[in-house]
Amino acid sequence: MKCPVCESEVSEKFNYCPECGAGLTESASRTISKEEAHKLLDLSFAFEINDMVEQAIKAYEAVLEVNPHYPDVHFKLANAYEAAGKMGKAISEYKKAIKLNPNYLDAHRKLGELYSDEGLYEEALEEYDNVLNIKVQHRYADVHNNMGVAYERKGDYEKAVEKYQIALDINPRYAKAHFNMGNVYLAMGRLDEAIESYTHSLEIFPRQPICLNNLGIAQASKGSFEEAKKAFQGALAIEPRYARAHHNLGNIYLDTGDEVKAASEFAKALEINPQDGESQAALEMMAEKKAEE
């Protein structure tokens, strides 16, 4: 069928036109006044802060039924769709907000993040470039960091390092960018630089179990087992049920000849994550070795 407002072809399963927001069914096409629309906006905000996502979505849709050319409401509706896990609809609403306001920084930024999460890295990078080009007098450390993430996920590590470095030039105390830089260096086998980056991140925010775990991996890869053990233990002091840190600590104990402690750590990892095939295999290997002695 056709939307009576924008004349777009729309599936009969829709109550509202996905292009302009107009109501398509008798119940959906009721009209509301501008005053009611403002009340719905207030109500939708209350729904959001109380984590009532579906109610917020309905309220935003009702506002857009009256005024489909309202970029802020499309943006808020996109946020609500994201919270509800409706990523395709979220992308559509961010694009509508941008179509109405091409300089909508937050919409470009959020669309870039969503594209990156969905594995659409080229599209993500295009949106991040849009952010940087809109206000060239500003330098956005977080946008450069997010571009680094997109390049990293694409496997372009050199470009990722370049973007993380720009983020850190803008904000040297950006712990997340230091951590991300460490991950890229670790993937590249540049262990000293990975350790340095993780250390910088932990100097800014010490209580990062995943950063401590990855620091331990880099140190263990260099053969610095005592330092690695301290890093894994540090991660577990913050998050005792961190299965991967238990597994990695088990490997350290195994490599340094303490099989009793190694078995204990593998068992803890498996208890927390019964799908941990590596810890299961390690325990079976140790049992077979013991049986052969």
Image: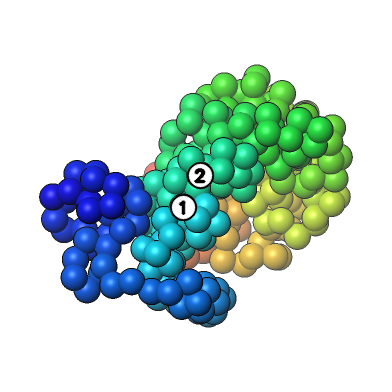
Asked if marks 2 and 1 touch (Cβ < 8 Å), the reply is yes
Q: Position of residue 194 (x, y in %)?
A: 73, 33
- Residue at the disc numbered 1: 69
Q: Position of residue 229 (x, y in %)?
A: 71, 50
Q: How many marks?
A: 2
Residue 84 seen in the current view: no
> Reading the chain from its start, which is encountered first: label 2 or label 1?
1
Disc 1 marks a residue whose amino acid type is His
Q: Vertically, is 273 above or below 180?
A: below
Residue at point 60%, 54% (across, down)? 245
User: Is 227 on the left or on the right of 211, as rendered?
Assistant: right
Q: Position of residue 23 (x, y in %)?
A: 27, 63
Packing grade of label 2 (10 A; few <14, some 14-19, many >=20) is: some
Instruction: Find residue 150 and report its image quarter.
Output: top right
The span from disc 2 to disc 1 (Cα, nearest Å) is 7 Å
Q: Which mark is residue 100?
A: 2
